[in-house]
Amino acid sequence: MIARILVPMDDSEMAERALEYALENHPEADVTVLHVAGEPGPMWGAATTLALADDLEEAAEEKAAPVFERAEAIAAEHDATVGTRVQVGSPARAILNHAEEYDAIVIGSHGGTLADRLLVGDVAQRVFRRSPVPVTVVR
C-alpha cells in the first residue's frame, strides 16, 4: 500500500499534472510537495537570486510560495491537503535524498524552464534511475 507520496514541483504544467495524478490515484495517501530551489551552476538563471540573498532559506521559501499556493489549490479541488517542503540544491539530488522517507515518488516528465526543455526529463530520468522507491513519471 502506498501511504506516503513525494511530489516534486516547480511552476510547470507537468508538475501540476503529477500532483493531480497522485491525488486522483492515491486519495488516501499523505502527499508532500517538494520544491527545490536550484543551486548556482553553469546556467545560473533563477539561482542567481538565491546566491545573492542574505538569508538563503528565506529566499528559497519566498521562491517556493507561489508553487505551494498552486499545489494547495489543486489539492483543494480534490478535497485533500498536502504537506510542503523546501530544499536548496540540485533538484535530482534533493529528491533522492528524501526518497526513502516515502513509499513512492510521482514526478512530472520535465519542468517548465528553457533549460529543462533543452534537457528534457533530465531530473525525472535521474530520479527514475536512482530512486530506492517506485517512481511514476507523469506527462
Image: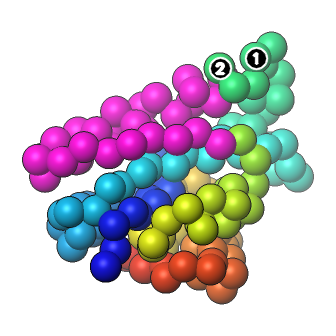
The overriding secondary structure of the stretch rendered in magenta is: helix
Inspect the image, locate mark 1, and give the three-letter code of the amino acid beneath it: Asp
Please name the residue shown 67% across and 66% down the image: 96
Q: Where the N terminus falls, by quadrant? A: bottom left
Residue 10 visible in image: yes
Please say whether residue 74 is one of the residues in the magenta stretch. Answer: yes
Toward the right, the furthest residue is 42
* Left or right, 28 with reference to 103: left
Tell me the quarter of the picture where residue 30 sits. Answer: bottom left
Q: Which mark is residue 58?
A: 2
Residue 108 visible in image: no
Which residue has dot 1 on it?
55
Please name the residue shown 57% across and 27% down the image: 61
Residue 87 locus on image (x, y percent): 65, 42
The part of the chain drawn in magenta is: 59-87
Q: Secondary structure at mark 2?
A: helix
Residue 41 locus on image (x, y percent): 86, 49
Please name the residue shown 20% across and 63% down the image: 28
* Left or right, 25 with reference to 19: left
Please name the residue shown 44% across and 40% down the image: 84
Please say whether residue 11 is one of the residues in the magenta stretch. Answer: no
